[in-house]
Structure formats: structure tokens, C-alpha cells
Image: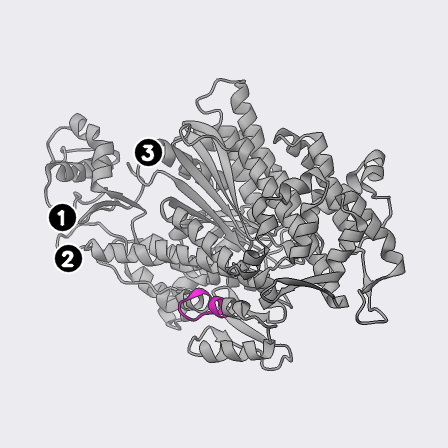
Amino acid sequence: RPSPVFPSTGLDTMPKQENGQREDSLIQNDPSESFEEEVGAFLGDEEKLHLFDDLTKVNPVTTRTVLKCLQARYRVNLFYTNAGCSLVALNPFQPFSCLYSPELMREYHVALCPQDLKPHIFAVAEQTYRNVQKQMDPVNQSIIVSGESGAGKTWTSRCLMKFYASVAASALSPKGNETVERIEKRVLDSNPVMEAFGNACTLRNNNSSRFGKYIQLQLFHHLTGASIQTFLLEKTRVAYQAPNERNFHIFYQITKGATAEERLEWNLPEGAEYRWLPNSERNLDEDCFEVTRGAMFHLGIGRAAQSNIFKVLAGLLHLGNVQFSNPVDESQPCELEDKTKEFVRTTGDLLQIPVEELLESLRIRTITAGKQQQVFKKPCSRAECETRRDCLAKVIYARLFEWLVLVINENICTDPSVWTSFIGLLDVYGFEAFPENNLEQLCINYANEKLQQHFVAHYLKAQQEEYAAEGLQWSFINYQDNQNCLDLIEGNPLSIFSLLNEECRLNRPSNTDLFQTRIEKALSSNQCLSRDKFSKKPNFIISHYAGKVCYQLAAMVEKNKDAVPPELLHVLQNSKDPLLQKLFPVTEKNQNNTKTQNKAAVVTVVSKFKSSLEHLMEILSRTTPHYIRCIKPNADCKAMTFRRAEVLSQLQACGIVEAISISAAGFPVRIPFQSFTERYELLRKSWGCSKKRTPGMDDDKAPRAAVLEILQDAVRGQSPAQETGNGAGIPSVYCGKTKVFLANAMV
């Protein structure tokens, strides 16, 4: 690709800007005949398309040429492709063990320049590791793994952790070091435990993460420890599974993998049926109980504690079989269905809660009223009893999950004085759009919107603005900005979140029809909001960056409140079970502050989730980000099946083509003068003070000469705005107002 000439100096310093402008036109389907001929000429030699391992080398860069190259590479088992600032990872939906072997990890680790090897997640991992070793600001690194549900994010994160654990842990440590091996083992063992308790089989993915996690790998020359931060576990899955979906993996593991003795202890007879265990006849790789138990043991959770955990989980399965019937007299509590009475007794035994107390907490509501704080007891309706039953299961499972994360962190996290830097791995649930979408999908898609905004702000927007501020000639490349969508969801003073929270504060049952009207009236000016007028159910539609999603309003307000009846908390606090006593401790405040609890401000689900995401974005903003875009080649998860329309929609949604255009026309290496001089001043001393190129200098020495000229200008305090270079053979180098820009990583 030819480089344009800077009119002020006549120097070959910058890639062609017209390429970026043309792509902007093409995204709008530019019909120009000459341009179509250019595209046709590039695509004419199909046998060579798979050789484009970096999409910035594609010319012209269009959605069509990019898609064709990815398809050609997928056909010959090349699943990773560089795309400017991102790595595109196509899911093969079949195992390729040779792609993730220890030998390959070592090859990328010892390579002089890992970027010269084939594109791979190990190349990204090694680059982040070397960046930390260089200690150039910002030292801390983050890898953001994104994509639709089923695109391969969990697998990618797992392989990245294996790479860091096996390579970074042994970098400066003697072979056989027991401490290092123990840290490495514990960090890796956190994966199967988190997946067992936090992943489930959905319509789109057999091992779908139903929570988000950010893992910080703590480094001081080598791996010293790690910490895990989690977001929004989909606890509703414990009590409700959509058709053809399953509960969390751990429930299937204990029912399929328990020994005869354990089945007796946990009351899980073979062949028993549980309402909260659908599709148990399906056998998945994730059903392996021994892997989870072994990992828990290495993380410091002994056999007795494990047995206690699994006994509580068995109690939840029996609780799911408890069903109620309407009483003959409405003033009396709901009746238990005859076939479920045994399940109540078993649940009480397993959770170590007296059956009478358990039943009362599920069927009787306590009301405190009046100045004298008189207590009244009112029987619950059948629907309320079922809601309380589900709520009891959800609150136990959520607390158990939080406790597990705490235990894991205690066993893998090290004191801040021991480590200096970190590499963060972000793996969040992918964008979701189901036939029925509610608060869970709204939060999941909101998280994806925030991550897309981070990509837009950090790369598509900030980099172009930086070029303009530094005085570089630049023709702006258009991109899709999702700020309007985020304003609709989280904006102030009015947004869907604020209206949801306001509805939760009202001391009355929510009316979904009225709530729908309020949303439409308050947010009608935002073009990202619409409604399915043909649906009888109250709903609203949000136009996300990845597509439109229709959300049902039924039960959304109640889910946002996430209220736990005090009767349920009381009965759990009185349990004799050691684990439940840890999860629901009894304190003086709990016992004597009932009135204050009733009047406490409601902390809603969306408020907590928004706060945790904002904290995450702050962490990411202080790190150097690296993006891995996982792409799902087909919705059916079929091996080696590439459906162009489905891949195209994902590429367009996440702005891959725009990112490639900006990368192709810009400078990938941008180093502040101070950091540049601190790191490379020693080259200046060895090179000498002359800026003139030696006659007959070899072309391979020209890049070094160009870099040293910039370095000398910076060190001497000369004008940083001047362009440098000596004509043919010198790669694109530009000295801006505050930074040194390099067209490749020549230094």
C-alpha cells in the first residue's frame, strides 16, 4: 500500500488516509465501478485469501473482503486472525488440542517477536506479559474477551490462565519450586469450581457463564497469586430454567457422580426426579464431579466442608419439589400437596431446619404495624408461597456462591506487598436475545454495551482525536457510537434504570401497563427505545449495538427489588447446619433492629450492578487494554460451519471493520516522550550525536537511525513537531507534540 506525502516536509511518514475514507464510503455500500473492480481484483485470487493473518493488510478493507478472508482461514483451520487492535477468534466447535499444547505455549513465550508467529491468544498473552516486564506506563494490562454467548469466551479465558500459570510462574523460579507449583495449581483450579457453580447449559451454549468475572493475575517477575471479582450471578436459574435449558452444572454433578454412601447421606436416590433438574438425561463434559471435587480440595475446601455444601444443594433440589394447593378456608395457610410432604421433611433434615418452622416461613407472612409495633400473621396465597420457596433457594445459592469466591480468593490472593503489577482477564456473559427477556438479559446486555463503549472510547474515538491533537493529517473514519443506548439504560436524571428504581421505592404493587406508559412518555425522545405493539404483554425494545431486544416488564420490578422476606432470613439464621450458620450469621443488629430493617433504603439489583460495573471500568481505564473478539460462526454450534450472515452481523456490531481501517491508516505504537527517552536513552549514547545517515547505510539499519534521530530530538529538547526520516527504506515515524509515533514495533 503506498504512503502519502506530508506536504510540509515531503517525507514518507504516514499510511494512506484515502483508504480510511473509502472504507467509510463502502460501509454505506459505495457503488462506484472502479471501487468494485478493486474489491473484485482482491477477491479474485481465492487461494491466497487464507494467507492474510493480519486484516490491516487487506486492501481495500471492506466488510466483504474481511468476511471472505475470515471464511477462507476458517476453512483451513486457521481460527485466529489479527484485526488491528483486536484478535478475532472463530469458534471451531470441535477440539484442536495441538492449538493449546504446552509446547506451543513455550514457543510463543521464547520467541524473539511473538507477533511474527501465527496469530494466537498466546501471542496476546505473551505481549501483555512482556509489557508488564518492561514496566512502561501504564504497566498493568487487561485482556477483554468479548462475544456472543457460545462464541468461546470461557474457553479462551481458561487457556489464557493456563498460559500465564505455566509460563509466568516458572519464568524466574527454579524448577520444582513447591510454592510456585502450589500457586499455579490453585489459580488453575479456581476455573472448574467457578464453572461448576456459575455455568449452565443454555439454548446457545452448553457451558454458558451465568455470571461475569474479572481475574487479576498478580505478578512480581513471576506469578505470585490472583484474585477474582464476580458480577451478577443469575441466581433465578436455581428455581427457573427455560425450556430445553438446564440448572447450574453442580446440581447434575452431584446427582450423577455421588457414591452410594453419599447418595444415602444427601438423600439422592438414583432415578429420582426433581423439578429444578430438567434435561438431566443429557450427558455433558461439564457433568464430571471428580474434577470439581479435586479442584475444591486443592483450594482448601476439605472433604467435610464439601460434603456440607453438597448436602445443602441436595436440600435445594428437594425444596423444588415442594408444591402447594389452595386452602378450603382462605383464612388458613395453603395446604401441601400430598405427594410433596416427604420432600418438605427431607429439605428440613438436609438444611437442619425444623419442618414446622420451615413451613411457617413459607406460608405465613408477618406484618408489623402501628406505633406499638404490633405483630400480625397473615397466610400467604399459593402464588406467594411458591415465590417464597423460590426466594429461599435463590438466597441460599447466592450466598453460597459469594462464600466460595471469598474462600477461593483467600487461597489464591497474596498480600499487595508481594506483587507490583497485574494482568486482568475479563470474561463476561455474551450479548443475549431470547424469545422472553427480562431483568437478567437487560443487565447482561447493559454490561456488553459498557464494554463496547470502552472499545469505542479507547480506540475508535480516542485514537483518532489523538492524531488530530498531535498535528497529524487525519481523515476521520466514522463508527457506531452506542452512547445513546447507554443514556437510555443508565442516564441521569431519567433512564430505564432510574425509572425501575423509582418504581421499587413506591409502597405498592407495580402495574406493568402503567409502568410501560411511564417509560414511553419519559424516554420517547431516545431513538433507541421502541415497543412491540403487536404483543399483548407490556414490553419495551432497546436497539443495542448488537441488535434489537424486546424486554418483558412482567416481574421486572420485583426482580429488581430482590427482596428477601425477613421470615426466611430468620429461619436460615436459626439453622443448625454449620455452612448455613456461616452464610447467615446471627448478630445483635439482626435480632434487635427489625424496625430499621423494614425502613432501610432499597438497594436494587440494577443499582448494585451499575456500581460494580463502574468500578470495573475504572480499573480497565488504568490499564493497557487488549481485545479478543470471539466470533460464533453459526448459531447451532456445528463444527466447521461458517454462516456468512451470522458472522457479518457480529463483525458489524462490534466495529471490527472500522477498527481495522483505523489501524491500517494509523500508528500502532504511541509512546510519550518521557517514557521513550527513559527507555531508549542508552541507544543514543552508543550511536553518537550525528544525525546524518552514513553513506551506504544498509536498509536494515535505517529504522534504527530514524528512531535515534527522534530520540536525540526529544533528549535535546528540539521541536517535537518536526517529522523525521531520510526517505526510502525508513518505516513511517512521526514525532508529535507530546509523543513518538511509530508505524510498527521497530524498536
Q: Secondary structure at mark 1?
A: loop
Foreground of the two, 8 or 214: 214
Q: Position of residue 269 (x, y in %)?
A: 86, 44
Residue identified by numbered label 1? 722
For the magenta stretch, what is the residue range? 490-499
Q: Position of residue 152 (x, y in %)?
A: 57, 49
At 80% across and 50% down in the image, what residue appears?
A: 355
Q: Is residue 196 magenta?
A: no
Residue identified by numbered label 3? 135
* The C terminus: image quadrant: top left
Q: Earlier in the sequence, mark 3 or mark 2?
A: 2
Binning the other alpha carbons within 10 Å of mark 1 as few (below 14), some (14 to 19) or many (20 upward) gives some
Q: Are marks 1 and 3 in contact (CB under 8 Å)?
A: no
Residue 323 appears in the rendering: yes
Binning the other alpha carbons within 10 Å of mark 2 as few (below 14), some (14 to 19) or many (20 upward) gives few
Give the mark toward the camera: 1 or 2. 1
The quarter of the picture where residue 128 lies is top left
Give the mark toward the camera: 1 or 3. 3
Left-right relation of 68 to 377: left
Residue identified by numbered label 2? 7
* Amino acid bearing label 3: Gln
At 65% across and 80% down in the image, what residue appears?
A: 536
Q: What is the spatial separation of the Cα atoms under label 1 and label 2, in whole angstroms?
A: 13 Å
* Amino acid bearing label 1: Gln
Say how many tags the image has: 3
Q: Position of residue 726 (x, y in %)?
A: 16, 43
Q: What is the spatial separation of the Cα atoms under label 1 and label 3, in whole angstroms?
A: 28 Å
